[in-house]
């Protein structure tokens, strides 16, 4: 499916130090073959290449979302979108609308529920039972670390009381022993498995549609943050049908409940690859999230929580990482609390470097001073999602800041310090946790407040990135995060033919206006997977 394409008359910010600016780029068989002035590039172009008039186009290397759940997200964002619903009443209205949309008597799902809905009322599934007409309903919070099940969903799943679950997993129960409907971490799965599953065909259709939507906002690649033994096959099927329009790095997710044979099966499956995807990484969660107290902290949070890792035995977590490393798999660890960050860095140091790529730590929402220089010194990639600052208030009145208290909140999301320490800093969205639009992601990294709302205060403004650093987080730094520094992240000969073509330069564009900067064309592997002029 790779393509031959020549764009002339554009303004190309190459991010290649050897030639930072150009007006033209030629791609042959999916690879950039020439970058420079129009005449020289035209001369180098393959015969029969499609010629694109690039006047009015500001081109940058194809943008990568370094932390995304494109396949899982396509499934989990079925059902009612509860983002922005601020009260129980607003959630009920959206659930009732979803019930009307799917014609009544079915299981209802909802996603992107916000913690502030429960500022004045305890989390309970009964709150929503009537809005879904007594049907089973499972709602997930925006971070997918907490869920709420209605009484009908609990009984469908046979969950009638406390369960013993790994790590921070919990079926929250009242004093009488009956579940409230709140499900923490792995407890969500108890109810999720009882809800109806789409077929493989339906799954692939949902995924392909999500990838096409990502192309519309300029994404050409993502680092998937979940994956199973089946994911490589799904990539293969999508690619064969020309529907894998966003490149994927695919890790295998190792859960604490997996035994050594299950880990061994992932290693035996080995590193697989197609043209636009490759596997051979491991993903692990050392903790949960700050708001419900499941992030693993050096000191308890303001409610005395945060002392429990997601891997009940952190030594086993380290041994699994060492085993993957010995088999050539770099590890990617979700670590939000400072104790979790330390545990990940220590496990990586013990496991040693891996040729396929660097180890990574995802999120790093709070960390200690002595942990910060270790990223650069030990070659560990820092991966952050500045767009998650949308749930935090600079006056520390939000659930995240209240849980950590003022002192730790002042050290939240040390994005600029990480980057300027010399660490690789890859940026992403964690979609479906937050929207995947890279224009919004870059704007949040630059502003640390809502783009377009210039009266709003920034959260820890000293951690703002420059416009160029923000773009690099989605290009050159994203490439380094998966050892693609010699093939991706720049527009240069020999590099992948992935381009994002805007109507203006995203670095020069005011951050408040960046989310509205039009994407004119998105090119993956030399093929235009999205063109604004086709959209009409
Ligand atoms: Zn994630």
Image (cartoon, grey):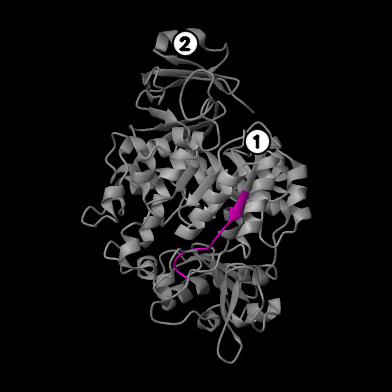
Name the quarter where the C terminus is drawn: top left
The residue lying at 68 percent from left, 53 percent from top is: 202
Instruction: Classify 156 as above or below 320.
Output: below
Rendering quarter of residue 77: bottom right
The earlier-in-sequence mark between 2 and 1 is 2
Classed neighbour count for the residue bearing mark 1: other residues with Cα under 10 Å, few (<14), some (14–19), many (≥20) = few
Classed neighbour count for the residue bearing mark 2: other residues with Cα under 10 Å, few (<14), some (14–19), many (≥20) = many
Q: Nearer the viewer, residue 471 or 532?
A: 471
Instruction: Classify 530 as above or below 103.
Output: above
What secondary structure characterizes most of the magenta part?
loop
Q: Nearer the viewer, residue 78 or 374?
A: 374
**Residue wearing tag 2:** 42
Whether 289 is among the magenta residues is: yes
Rendering quarter of residue 327: top right
Q: Which residues are magenta?
A: 283-292
Which element is circle 2 on? helix
Q: Which label belongs to residue 242?
A: 1
Q: Is residue 345 left or right of residue 206?
A: left
Instruction: Classify 517 as above or below 23.
Output: below
Image coordinates of residue 476 in percent, x first then y, are 45, 32
Rendering quarter of residue 132: bottom right
Find the distance from the CA under tag 2 to the CA under tag 1: 28 Å
């Amino acid at each position: 499916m790779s393509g031959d394409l020549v764009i002339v008359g554009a303004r190309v910010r190459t991010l290649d130090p050897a030639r930072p600016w150009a007006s033209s780029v030629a791609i042959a068989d999916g690879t950039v073959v020439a970058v420079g002035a129009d005449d020289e590039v035209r001369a180098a172009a393959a015969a029969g290449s499609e010629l694109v008039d690039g006047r009015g186009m500001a081109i940058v290397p194809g943008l990568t979302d370094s932390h995304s759940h494109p396949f899982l997200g396509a499934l989990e964002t079925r059902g009612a979108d509860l983002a922005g619903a601020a009260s129980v009443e607003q959630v009920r209205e959206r659930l009732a609308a979803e019930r009307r949309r799917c014609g009544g008597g079915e299981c209802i799902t909802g996603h992107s529920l916000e913690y502030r809905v429960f500022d004045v009322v305890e989390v309970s599934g009964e709150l929503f039972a009537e809005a879904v007409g007594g049907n089973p309903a499972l709602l997930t919070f925006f971070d997918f670390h907490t869920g709420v099940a209605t009484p009908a969903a609990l009984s469908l799943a046979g969950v009638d009381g406390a369960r013993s679950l790994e790590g921070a997993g919990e079926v929250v129960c009242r004093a009488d022993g009956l579940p409230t409907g709140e499900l923490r971490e792995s407890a969500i799965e108890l109810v999720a498995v009882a809800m109806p599953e789409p077929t493989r065909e339906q799954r692939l259709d949902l995924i392909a549609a999500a990838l096409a939507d990502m192309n519309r906002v300029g994404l050409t690649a993502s680092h998937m943050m979940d994956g199973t033994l089946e994911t490589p096959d799904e990539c293969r099927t999508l690619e064969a049908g020309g529907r894998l329009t966003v490149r994927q790095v695919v890790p295998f997710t190792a859960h604490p409940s997996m035994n050594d044979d299950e880990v061994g099966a992932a290693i035996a499956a080995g590193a697989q690859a197609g043209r636009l995807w490759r596997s051979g990484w491991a993903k692990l969660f050392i903790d949960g999230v700050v708001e419900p107290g499941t992030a693993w902290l050096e000191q308890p949070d303001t409610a005395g929580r945060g002392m429990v890792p997601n891997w009940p035995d952190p030594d086993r977590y380290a041994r699994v990482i060492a085993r993957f490393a010995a088999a050539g798999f770099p590890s990617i660890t979700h670590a939000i609390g400072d104790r979790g960050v330390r545990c990940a860095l220590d496990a990586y140091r013990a496991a040693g470097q891996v040729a396929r790529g660097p180890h990574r730590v995802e999120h790093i929402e709070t960390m200690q001073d002595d942990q910060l220089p270790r990223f650069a010194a030990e070659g560990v990639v820092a991966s952050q999602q500045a767009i998650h600052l949308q749930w935090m208030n600079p006056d520390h009145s939000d659930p995240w800041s209240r849980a950590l208290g003022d002192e730790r909140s002042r050290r939240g999301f040390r994005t600029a310090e990480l980057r300027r320490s010399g660490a690789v800093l890859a940026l992403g969205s964690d979609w479906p946790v937050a929207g995947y639009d890279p224009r919004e992601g870059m704007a949040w990294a630059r502003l640390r407040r809502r783009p377009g709302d210039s009266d709003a205060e920034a959260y820890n403004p000293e951690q703002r990135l420059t416009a160029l650093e923000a773009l690099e987080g989605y290009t050159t730094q994203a490439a380094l995060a998966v050892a693609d520094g010699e093939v991706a992240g720049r527009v240069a000969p020999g590099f992948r033919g992935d381009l994002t073509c805007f109507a203006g330069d995203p670095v020069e564009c005011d951050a408040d206006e960046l989310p509205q900067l039009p994407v004119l064309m998105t090119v993956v592997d030399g093929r235009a997977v999205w063109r604004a002029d086709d959209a009409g």
